[in-house]
Image (tube, rainbow, N blue to C red):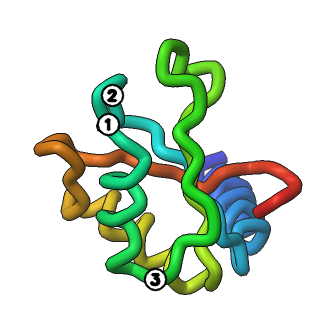
Amino acid sequence: FGSSHRLVRRVRVGLVLSAMAGSRTIQITGGVFVSTTRMWLKKELERFGEVDVCHMGNRDRPEEEPPWVRFKQPRAAEDALAACERGEVLVDGHQLKAAWRAGPKG
């Protein structure tokens, strides 16, 4: 059971990673508040590459429509996400948390 369970998990993780390969859009899952401006969020993330779209989502209900950022190049999105995972991206003194955004725009 143990080794087959690990293999199934590894396959699932691999499928998720390959599905996100080439994605340009990350979803901001934490660290953005009502007072956070689109300009500052975009400016902080542009250090990883050119931003195509910076959408603030629903500021009153971010769990329903969270902010997301689409980069011009997939590598910029990968770098920004990795930096968020390492805790290196701050906006207004708050650490951003992010994940790949699932959806048709990728």
Most foreground residue, 50 or 15: 50
Q: Is residue 69 left or right of residue 106?
A: left
Which label lies toward us, 3 or 1?
A: 1
- C-beta proximity under 8 Å, tags 2 and 3: no
First in residue order: circle 2 vs circle 3: 2
Mark 2 Cα-neighbour bin, 10 Å: few <14, some 14–19, many ≥20: some
First in residue order: circle 3 vs circle 1: 1
What's the CA distance linking mark 2 and mark 3?
23 Å
Label 2 SS? loop
Q: How many marks?
A: 3
**Can residue 105 be spotted in the picture?**
yes
Q: Residue at x 30, y 64 (%)?
A: 44
**Residue on which the image places disc 3:** 49
**Residue on which the image places disc 1:** 36
What's the CA distance linking mark 3 and mark 1?
20 Å
Determine which quarter of the picture holds residue 86: bottom left
Q: Is residue 87 left or right of residue 62?
A: left
Image location of residue 33, percent across then percent down: 33, 28
**Residue on which the image places disc 2:** 33
Most foreground residue, 36 or 105: 36
Label 1 SS? loop
Q: Is residue 78 left or right of residue 86?
A: right
**What residue type is disc 1 on?**
Thr
Most foreground residue, 67 or 13: 67
- C-beta proximity under 8 Å, tags 2 and 1: yes
User: Does 57 sit above or below residue 84?
Assistant: above
Outermost top residue: 60
